[in-house]
Every structure is written in structure tokens, then in C-alpha cells.
Image (cartoon, rainbow, N blue to C red):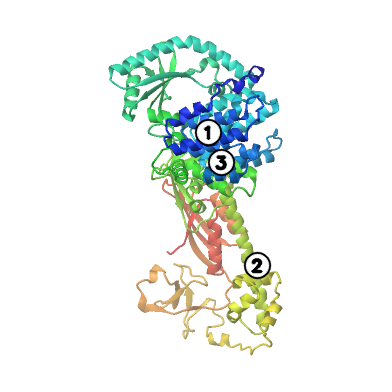
Amino acid sequence: MAEVKNLPNGGYPMHTFADVEDLYYEYISSEHDRKRINQAYEFMLEKHEGQKRMSGEDYAQHLIEVAYILSDLHCGPNTIIAGLLHDTLEDTKTSLEEIVHFFGEDVGMLVESLTKIQRLKLSRMENEEFEAEDHRRIFIGMAKDIRVILIKLADRLHNLRTLGSLSCDRQIALAQESMDVFIPIAHRLGLDKIKSEMQDLCLKYLEPDIYKHITSLLTKKTKTLEKSLDGIKKRIADLLFENHIPFEIESRVKSIYSIYHKMYVLNTPFDEIYDILALRIITDTEIQCYEILGLIHQTYVPIPGRFKDYIAMPKPNLYQSLHTSILGGDGNRYEVQIRTKEMDEVAEVGVAAHWAYKEGNGYNSKQEQQEIENKLHWFRDFVSLSSNAEEGDAKEYVDSLTKDIFEANIYVFTPKGKVIELPSGSTPVDFAYKIHTKVGDTTVGALVNGVMVPLNTVLETGDMVEIKTSKNSTPSEGWLSFVKSSLAKQSIKRFISKKNADQERGEKIQKGKQSLLDSFKDKGIDEEEMVSLLNTKKVLEHFECNSLDDLYVMVYGRKPSPSAVIDYLKIRKPVNQSNDSDATFNFKADSTCPVYCKGADNIAISLANCCTPIPGDEIVGYITRGKGISVHRHDCPNIENEKDRLIDVYWKPNLDKENYPVDLVIQAVDRQKLLLDIMSALANHKIPLTQIHGKVVGNSGKVNFQTTILVPNSKRLTDVINILLNINGVYDIKRATH
Ligand code: MN
């Protein structure tokens, strides 16, 4: 870019501090604040005295231009001051204490945050790891305060304008970094003016030939179009005038970058880009916007599919406008944007328009930050994602930021009409995690636009999504194969690793306890007694553990060993082992029924078929007419009104060896291979299955399986139910009664 190299200030108009003053005098009237800004200017001049930029200008020029851009955005006094001082810590012998002393804590914090971002050595980035690390630091720094972002964007914009005087390598590195980091954030904040200027400047250095090609094409085309444009402008003006609607009408050439995007990314030949020249109509009220649209559609033929109502549905960066494309009657197409003055301001400077410095009404930067977070949902995600991001994998952080926040481009609704943004390709599971981790973790089904769908269904903009949860349900590892957002991915992985850790601990507890129990039994002490001996503050403190489970885990690791525990408790010799427990159980030795009834050992006793009780269930006996006692679960509906025929019954001890049938109803969202997954899960856990048949419920997409499995007891049954609930699609399991 030889022709730019020697132009002062990159060929851009050079501003003086008086120009900056002209801007902020318009909206900052406090003498005190004006004086502080002036002091910052003097302070900066003194500190940077004698320093030159690569382009040959005084270093101070850069800081004046940054302050100019910030004042143009109507930033507050502290933001302008921090803009003027943003390079003092890094490039001059100024201390943070000095800045805080003269300009206060708030300015000190801003300058410090900016210096931390600055301290990146911008070499040509060679490896992804390093690049991610760098981007992470910039993002984390910017997430601290919205004003840090505004100053950093102003700083970068001016650096891009004056890029011509840097080496080719630095030009490319800075332009690429701007594309990766600063342009996405400017876009998401709705700072459109800054964004498009940055895009054009980056294109100029990253694709110089294409840039030149487009500018020359554009010069030719605009000349031929200008005449017709004047024509249509006049005709629309007449139309609005006749209808007594206030308006301003302007036309503009689309940015070079947006034409580049159409030509080289969307593959549209230059001659087929019809909206190079766009009309913009600005009026007073929202209603008038729609009136104007009506008049234009009545007079000109609208092009189908090009009308967009961003007034009713603002973009996530708060942009509002009506868009349409029309045939102008002169053989040309025109893009027309219609909006109010306020909307126009937001369109140009985005978030800055909403939080432009307001004097006198208790301006408070914390409150301002809070307001921004409430209004821009993605910004809250950005802040929370960044708050713990200094540790951990930089690439993962930058990836999730890029995917979940900067590339989020589908918009779906909650049943209450709240808009949720997700990366494209997202599924109901991504949606559920976006609502809340708890919702994601317990998701069992989803309705999209009122219809039950599989959880891997790809969502589209406009879908209304409702998530069905079940409090005992847990995430399935299989979800990882289809979720799109990093938020969902990370949450599922976190859950699974926690589950594995819990499972591992559970096993250690069990094994540690068993080995203790074995040693205690040798001393004639049973489980109950052992627990009461060990579960005392004194014992737990002695072994430095918080709970009995902790002690079991430690015993599992042989620190302490079971004998060390026994030694500590000074247990010496076995107590007299009485073995009369069996004698009190007076059931028939040959009875095959696992249940007995005291004092009724001659009466036949059997398990009821209706509710299939298994050892561990709470049970009750029912005295049948002539067929002895049938054993039911205590809540079996068949015995509900039979109080006077009920009798207490008990499970026999040590019943772990036999299996008993139990009937289950498994409710699930139907999908391919679901039955196969259920059967193989049971087989993998060695659970015998004696029957299973599925029945589809209407056309709801749900299926119920009637199942009979064999288990030794209710504890094992709980395990089996949890295993089955982990299968993707399964959302509820009930014991059946017939
Ligand atoms: Mn700078």
C-alpha cells in the first residue's frame, strides 16, 4: 500500500484537541468534567512528549483520534479520559498510582485493564494454541467493563486507519486479529459504523487485489446508477410529501466488504448485486415507518422474500428497522430501509446509543454495565463465560465464545415467548442447557411447535420449544454426538465425569466398609454395632475424616487398615456369638415363598401376581378365601379396601440368591433402535428379561413398553431403573399393577 504509506494520519482528516472538545461540549456541560478531560489531555501531552508513531506523527495524535472517536460515540468523561491515557502505563514512565491520584480509581481501573490487553506481543501467530491464548486475554479484559471494549475498539480503529506505515507482517497480523476478535464484538454490540470501517480496512490489507478490483467496479457502477437513484429519491419524496409524512431520505453505497462478501463468499456476480445503492428513509414514529412501507409497496413492486420487520423483531444487537427491496419502475432494484431517528442512531452506534452518557441523573458505571447485561443477553453469557476463564484450556474458551456467542444465529422461543439464541444446528438439548444446566441435565423429551420430537432434532429460527424434564433423569453420553453449543457439551461432559467420580467413590465406600465389616465380624461385632462404634466425632476426628463414608474410603486405601481401626477402638476378644436368630423365625424350611407370617406357618403363602412384590418392598399379607395368604405391595390398589383381611408378613433374611419377577412400564420417546438399546442395557447388566412389548401412544411419538424382568431385591431394581432412565429417550419408569 505504497500510496498510503506517506500520508499523515493514514490519509484521514487529522483532528485537533479542539475538535474533540467541540464534540463533547455538546453533551458534557459540567465544568468539572470538562476540566478533567482537559487535564488528561495536558497530562498525556507531557508524558508522551517527543514520542513519534511509525507514520512520523506525534504519538499524541493517536490519542487525540481515539478521544475523538469516543466523543463521537457520546461516551462519558471517564471513558474519554481513559482513552487519552490508555497508552501511558505501557509506553511512558507513568505509574498506576499517579493516574489514580490525578484521575480517580475508575479511570485507573480502565487504563489498567487496557494495558493488560495491550501487553500482547503481536507476532505473526503461528500456532493455534498461542493465538487462542492471546484472544482469550483480550476477551477477558474486555468482558470486565463495556467501556474497555469501546476504548479498545476506538484504539484499534485508529491503528487500522494508519496501518500503512507498518511492516507487511504486522499489517496482516493486526488485520487478521481484528477480523477474529474486534469485528465480531463490534458487530454484536451493534457498532455498525466502526464494524464496517474496520472490515473495509482489514480487507484492504488481507486481500489487496480484490479490494482494488471492487473499488474500481464500484466507481463505474455508481456513476451509471446515480441518475436513476436521484429519480427514485424524488418520486418517493413526492409520495411521502403528498401523504403528509415527515421524512428524511438518503442514499448510500454499500460497504466494500459487504460487496466482497456477496461476490466471494455468496458467489454472486457483481452485475447481479442489486442493492449496491440503498435508500434510507428516516421518520418520526414507528407507526409512520409502517405507513411509509405501505405507501411504497402500493406504488412499487416489492421483491418477494426481501421484506424483513426488525422493528417487531429486533436483532440481538438491538438493531431495529424495516427492510424491503423494490423494483423502481426504471429497470433497477433498490433496497429500502425505513426507521425512526432513534433506531437510526442505534443502527450506527448500537449499544453506545442506548447508554450514551447522560448527565445529571446519577450516572453510575456499575449500573450502566448491569443495564447492558440485562438488555444484551449474549453479553451476560460473555461475562459469565469469561469470569472463570483464566484457568483451563484457552482454545476451548475461545471456541465456545465464537460458537455460542459470536456465531449464534438461530432464534427460537420459549413457550412464554422469550427469544433464545443458539448456534445453528442446535437441538432441543442445546436449548435446554441454555435455559438452565438443571433443565439440561434432567431433559427427557421436547415439544417443538407442539409436537413431540426426538432430542436430536435440529431447531430452526422461529421454532417454539418446550422441554420435558424428569427430576431423576440424567444426561446421556449419547447427547454428545449431536449437541452443537459448547455450553451443552461442557455441561454434559462435566456431569459424566462427576458421575464417574461418584460411582468410583461409591465403590470405594462399599469395599472399604466390607473389609472393615469382615474384620469386625471376626470380633463378633455386626454391622449395626460397628457403625455405631465408628460414627462418633472422636473416631472421625482421630482419623481426620468428615464422615463415616470418608473413613470407609480411607480404609479402602489401607490408610488406616481395618486392624488399625480395631486397635484404636481397643476391641480385644470376640463377644459371645449367639446364633439363635434363626430360631425366632418360625417359617417352614421347605417353603419356597420368600415371605413368612408369624404364627401362620401352616398356611400356604404366595406372592401376588398383580403387583409382583420383591424383597425389600414394603409388603402386607392378604387372607384369601381358601388359597392362603397372598403377599402384596403395601400400596397395591387391589387391597386398598380390604383392611380387615390384611395381616403382617415379613421377608425372610438373606434373600439375595433368588430372582423374582417384577413388571415395569417404561415410557419413552420413540426412536430407532430404542428397544435394542433397552434390551442390550439389561443384558449388559445381566438382568434377565422374560417379556417386553412396546405400544406406540397415538401419534404422540411416545411409546410404552410392558416389561417383566427378574431381580433379587428392590435395591437392585432401583439400580436397574436408573440404568434404563439413562437410555436416550426413556423418561419414566413405573412398577406395574394389574
Ligand atoms: Mn493505542
Considering every residue shown, the one lying at the far bottom of the view is: 576
Please rate how many residues cluster around mark 1, counting C-alpha atoms within 10 Å: few if below 14, some from 14 to 19, many from 20. many
Give the secondary structure at mark 1: helix
Query: Which mark, residue 142?
Result: 3
Q: Is residue 653 visible?
A: yes
The image quadrant in which ligand 1 is located: top right
Give the answer, above or below, for where 446 lies relative to 517: above
Give the answer, above or below, for where 387 lies relative to 736: above
Q: Residue 442 at what x, y percent from top left?
A: 50, 54
List the residue tagged with mark 2.
508
Q: CA distance from mark 1 to mark 3?
A: 12 Å
Please rate how many residues cluster around mark 3, counting C-alpha atoms within 10 Å: few if below 14, some from 14 to 19, many from 20. many
Q: Residue 544 at what x, y percent from top left?
A: 64, 72
Is 149 in front, or is 733? 149
| Residue type of the residue flagged with mark 2 | Lys
| Residue type of the residue flagged with mark 1 | Ala
Quarter of the image with the C terminus is: bottom left
List the residue tagged with mark 1.
186
Give the secondary structure at mark 3: helix
In the picture, residue 463 is in which quadrant?
top left
Question: In the figure, is residue 309 to the left or right of 521?
Answer: left
